[in-house]
Every structure is written in structure tokens, then in C-alpha cells.
Amino acid sequence: MDGWVGAWTGGRRAVHVGNVADFNEQFVDEREHRPQDPDRRARRLRQAHHYAGLAVAYGPDPAALVLPAEVDRAWIDLLARELDWGPVESYAGIAPGRTVARALADRPALAERLAGAPGPVLHWGRTADLGDGPELAAVRRYESKAAAHELFTALAPGHPEVRVPRQEHADTHRRAARRLAARAARGLATVLKSPYGVGGYGTAVITPQHVLAAGGARALLRRLVREDALPPGGDLLLEEYVDGGPAGSDRLRDLTFDAVIGADGRVHPVGVGEMAVDGTRYQGVTVGPGTVPPGAAAAAERFGLAVGERLAAAGHRGWFDVDFVTDRDRRLAPTEANLRLTGPAVAFVLRHRLDEVRGPGHLVRTLDAMPLGARLSQEALFGHLEQLRPRCARLGVTVLPLIVTACHEPEPAVGLALAARGERAAEALDAAQALLGAAHHALGRMFEALR
């Protein structure tokens, strides 16, 4: 099998392991595990375990799923029907309060069974328990936003449609505050970044008004640490803020290019999608025909393939992406590389599978954290969505639940994928998203009426 699917799975059914927390933990500074703040790690672990629900779509046809949080079998059966999967073994709820690697270490029979599966074993990302060597070294190097920036800068001269934002490094929060204050005094907005971070954590856009309102740059940094928006110590990067111009219906802002590096080191493009980003926090993506204008998509692919060739030379194998923002002239500004699966990867996989089993031309939109108006059990959430899925189907939209374990959090949410085909697919997705959002919000009013 040619193309990215062949490089990723060889066309075989795979084992999907939701090791999101394991991947993230290898980049957490030890200072973040201080005894006086024991809930920080537990909160991060729980959030990562929710996001690991995306493991259901790491590949087109799972043979087995390993999920750290408890997931009702009804969800998996629903997806199996919609996506025409074969029988799926499920090992859910194996890692409450710990990483998947630790859980599997305590279950050697299960670990041996997974390792002996006839198809590939797909993980969110490479970690030390999966083997050391050049692949892990490449991940640990280029997941750094500083190292990725150096790579982008080296490649940019060959790509006139790409501009790399200026970046400077501060080795302490005190030095970062001084430089942030100096930039604010010149009227400049700054993207403040921890060298490592995922999903928007460790990144904040700081305007001069933010610095003034906080009572100074040092006070602002202390507040961001208290709010768990930034790590409590270590290096920080100060990056030029790329102004994309006023928001509007035709504004193209946040893009991702995804690809797979095969075992032979060849880079196979997957696609370009338009991400939804709230501030600095990733919310979801839309992929499929017409989502990104051809010129921008081609420019993102050319630069992304050049990045991929460098990553392959450094030893990386598997999925990666490059994220971009656009400036007022629609030039692409690369912001980070991710040497792992991502939220958009799931959308690309679902699009491929739906095209395969239902016919070509699908537009897929993922919504990773749609707020719910009330805390629900998984059973109640299932009932809620089962009432909404036929209404969305009448709009021509298929609803696929992906993240279902965050429905009972203090701020409950659900992760969904929406899919449609045809000339008006984008409008159908917009309508279904609005319908779902209103219905989720109405849950709160419904429960208030029962008091």
C-alpha cells in the first residue's frame, strides 16, 4: 500500500495505545512535581487521560484499544458501526492516577499480548519505555520550540512564502520579565513560550495592556504560574507576535500540515487543515476539500516536507506536523513542530476511513472540548448525544463521539468529530456545530428546572 496509510499502518489493523500522559511527562521539569503542589501532576494526568480518548482514531481500523480512563463499551461499539471496524478488543480504565507505561508494567501478560499483535502498535508518541535511540533523541530535540525555531530559520531562505517570527531566549523568569517589560514599553505584543508544551499549555500572548493591568511583567508572570498557564521555573522564549489582521469570514489564521515518515525515512504528506484556536489553546480542526486555499496549502506542504526531511535525517519515524499562523499578507509563519500524533491527525485518519467506507469527499471537523451545561455520567451523555445524532443526520452530518470521559469534570466537556459530504458540507458542519452547542448549553437549564 502506497502513501501515508501504508507508511503508518501498512494497511493492517493496529493496536492503539493512549499514552498521552506518558509522552507529556517526559517534558515536565522536575520543579513542577514539588511536594507543596501535589495536585498539579494529578490534574495534568487526568486531563491527558481524557485526551487519550482520541486513541480510538489513531489509525483507520483498530484491532485493540488501550485507554487509560474508563470508557463504556457502548461508545466503542457505536464507532465500530459507523466506521465499519472489525471486532475491537478494549482495555479501558487501566491507568487511573498513573501513566500507561506503569500500568502495563504491572500487567505483563497484557503487555506481552499487545506486543505480539500481528499488526502495528500505534502510540500517541515515543517515550523511553518504547526504546531509546535516534527516534527518541529526535523527539526530545525537536519537540523543543527553540530547536524547531532554529530548524525553521535554517529552511526559510528556500521558501519565500514563509516568514519565521523572531525569537529570543531567557534562562530565568526574572530575565524574561525584564525583556517582556522592555517589549511592552515599545508597544509590542509577545508570544511567551515554555520550550515544551502541548495543546496551548506553556504559551501565552502578552500585550502591553496585559502587562500594565497586572502591575508589571514580573507580577504578570507570577500570576500565569499560579493559574498553571506557565511552568513555575526554567527557560522561557519570547517570540514576535504575528498579526493576522482583523477577524473575518475570509480570515485564514491557524494551519497545520501533517505527514508520516516511513520506516525507510521517506516523508509522506497527509494533508493541510485549518485549526480552531482560542487564544493559544487548540480547540479542533477542519480537514477536507476546500478547507484551505490551494496556494496556502501548497506552501504549507512544501515547507512541511522540507521540515520532515530534516526530522527523518535526525532519526524520527512516524507522524509529525508543523503548525503555522498567517500574517496580514497570508504569508505562513511556522510556530512549532510536533513529533507525535496530534488532534488534527485524528481528523485526517477519520476522513480517510469515511472516504474508504462511504465514498470520497468527506469534510471532517473535530471539536475536542465542547462545553456541556451540566456534569453527566457517560450513560447520560450517551443518551443526550443519541437524541442529537438523528437531528444532525437530517443536516447531512455524522456525529462521532471521541472524548467522552471529561463529561463529569467540574467544567464538563465532550470531544466530537463531525463529518459531511457534498457542495454544502461546510455549511452543514456549521449548522450541526451550532445545534450541538445550543443543546449542550441547554443541559444546564434542564437541570436547573429539576431543582
Image (spheres, rainbow, N blue to C red):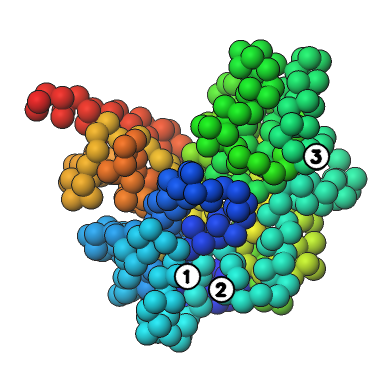
Answer yes or no: do the residues labelled 2 and 1 have beta carbons within 8 Å?
A: yes
On the question of residue 327 being in view, the answer is: no
Picture coordinates of residue 82, whole percent (x, y): 31, 59
Picture coordinates of residue 259, whole percent (x, y): 64, 59
In 3D space, how far apart are the residues under numbered discs 3 and 1 (Cα atoms)? 33 Å
Which element type, helix, strand or loop, lies under badge 2?
helix
Q: Is residue 275 left or right of residue 257?
A: left
Residue that badge 1 annotates: 101
Q: Amino acid at mark 3?
A: His
Which of 14 and 451 lies nearest the eye of the viewer? 451
Which element type, helix, strand or loop, lies under badge 3?
strand
Q: Residue furthest right?
A: 157
**Crowdedness near tag 3: few (<14), some (14–19) or many (≥20) residues, C-alpha within 10 Å:** some
In 3D space, how far apart are the residues under numbered discs 2 and 1 (Cα atoms)? 7 Å
Picture residue at 65% right of the left edge, 59% below the top: 339
Query: Is the N terminus in the top left, top right, bottom left or bottom right quadrant?
Result: bottom right
Q: Is residue 9 above or below residue 436?
A: below
Q: Is residue 133 left or right of residue 14?
A: right
Q: Amino acid at mark 1?
A: Ala
Picture residue at 80% right of the left edge, 61% below the top: 310
Q: Amino acid at mark 2?
A: Asp
Picture residue at 40% right of the left edge, 70% below the top: 103
Q: Is residue 101 left or right of residue 140?
A: left
Residue 367's disc number: none
Residue that badge 3 annotates: 169
Q: Is residue 234 left or right of residue 356?
A: right
Picture residue at 60% right of the left edge, 71% below the top: 128
Which element type, helix, strand or loop, lies under badge 1?
helix
Residue that badge 2 annotates: 129
